[in-house]
Amino acid sequence: MERAVERIIKALREREKIAIYGDYDVDGTTGAAILYLFFKELGFDPVVIFPHRERDGYGLHAHLLPPLKEQKVSLLISVDCGISAHEACEVAKELGIDVIITDHHEVGPKIPQALAVINPKRPDSAYPFRELAGVGVAFCLLRALRQKLYQKGFFKDENIPNLRRFLDLVALGTIADIVPLRGENRLIAYFGLKELENTSRPGLQALKKIAGLENETLDTNGILFRLAPRINAGGRLKEAALAFKLLITEDPTEANTLAQELHRLNAERQRLEERILREAWEQIKEKWGLKRSSYVLASPNWPSGVIGIVASRLQEALYRPVILLSLREGIAKGSGRSIPEVNLYQCLSLCRDYLRAFGGHPAAAGLKLDLENIASFAEAFEKAVTQHLAGKPPVRQLRIDAWVRIRHLLEPNFLEYYFKLGPFGAEYPEPVFALRNFEIRSSTILKERHLKFYLWQEGLGIPAVYFRFEGNPPSQVRALAASLDFSHFQGRQYLQLRIKDLKA
């Protein structure tokens, strides 16, 4: 960190051209945005670039650096990528561009030869919290940079940048990246959600409005299921620069236009997702059925920007690690999702002989390989996963926090204290309540895929919804497990149950 901060201060003093290189997801675009806005506040105008998901794929790419040299860039700062960018760092050195890597992905056996590599997962890292998102690491850089600039007398007292104003973006990227919501991430989420609720950024205001969150109390579900998919849609189907512009714009008219475009792209993404999901299920039925420990599926008709979401849905349905590959121009680019029992990154490490590149986390990863290696890789991956499971098929578990009755959930004191438990997220899950001995009324299917009905018990009723329910509405339900869901309508807040499982 110290080396990175000193190099940035040198660039600021000598008015060097700085470039910010962000990943194309919410984590990367929010991280790039806070760096850009900080430098902008200091009177600088950095170059900001993102790799294209289809043309380039994930990571810091060497072929994108020469154009930066032509723009006289002498310092590049990466966000949410770069920990495996050995070639890019070598090319940057030849071009005379210093590289500062900020990343949070798993560290391989060798660290790239950059000027500075900031990653809390480094084996030699002394930082007390290692689970930051990419935007969280970028925020650490800003904290350290602002402190050092202050010590060196760079600011007049009234011109010290207020980093709290960036917490709306930091929380947005942190929650969207599904990192553990404990430790420092918990502070970011708790205070950042408050900033996000009252944000003055035209882009976020427009996005909240089009996502139906304009007058709602924001929680992690609002980010995960409404804001993040729309921000991600730019990088998935078009350009990540669309989302970045939305986050930094000060023009309400431009913000509304960008929000509308991202909303449209998200709807297109949903249609693509459903088609790919159908085709993936057909492959599974034709090739293997439900007998494998893992699934590697491939098609030239699957855009790489959407396959990660489909892999996630298949992993949830099959409760097995799933990798989907997009086949384009002789290369397979893939996205994988795993279950708690299987460390995806470790399994890919065991298959590295078949891969051109890979990186990620225990639960999610990206990879690239040659077409002729797909079959061999699939078998090697199956072997690695089977070894990881030690021959025991994984069993999905749903942990119940309490058996309750409807009157318990509607008790005002309970609801008051329940709100104080949030925000919920990875490794800090929302409580799961189980109910039995109730009556079901007014059962309907919404939008052909969501089951909704009312539970009645002891003269009290509460609505319940089961998202992506498959099958016919059950006439009788013996028991169900659900979390609490709060929605707003015409200025009022409503409580419903979000069903996680039921026994007919």
Image (cartoon, helix red, strand yellow):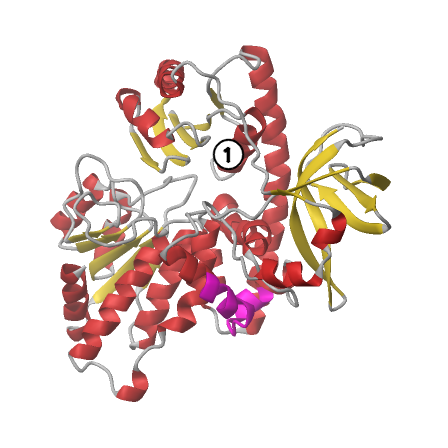
On the image, the x and y values in percent for residue 325 come to 45, 27
| Residue identifier under label 1 | 307
Q: Decide: is 107 above or below 41.
A: above
In the rendered view, tell whether residue 256 sits above or below residue 458: below
Q: Residue at x 36, y 38 (%)?
A: 361
What secondary structure is the magenta-colored segment mainly? helix
Residue 113 relative to residue 127: left or right: left
Q: Nearer the viewer, residue 93 or 223?
A: 223
At mark 1, the secondary structure is helix
Q: How many marks?
A: 1
437 up-or-down from 208: above or below: above
Percent x, y of residue 160: 30, 81
Query: Along the line of sight, which residue is nearer the eye, 322 or 438?
Result: 438
Q: Which residues are magenta?
A: 190-206
For disc 1, the neighbor class at 10 Å (few under 14, some 14 to 19, many from 20) is many
Q: Quadrant of the C terminus?
A: top right
**Residue 247 in sight from this viewpoint:** no
> On the rendered image, what quadrant is the N terminus found in?
bottom left
Task: Specify whether residue 409 is painted magenta.
Answer: no
Residue 488 occupies quadrant? bottom right
Q: Position of residue 283 (x, y in %)?
A: 56, 18
**In this rendering, position of residue 251 left or right of residue 381:** right
Answer with the quarter of the image where residue 376 lies.
top left
Asked which quadrant contains residue 491, the reply is: bottom right
- Amino acid at dot 1: Ile
In the shown orientation, is residue 161 left or right of residue 298?
A: left
Give me the residue at 23% from left, 66% from top: 17
User: In the image, 480: left or right of 311?
Assistant: right
Residue 205 drawn in magenta: yes
Which x, y percent locates residue 336?
44, 31
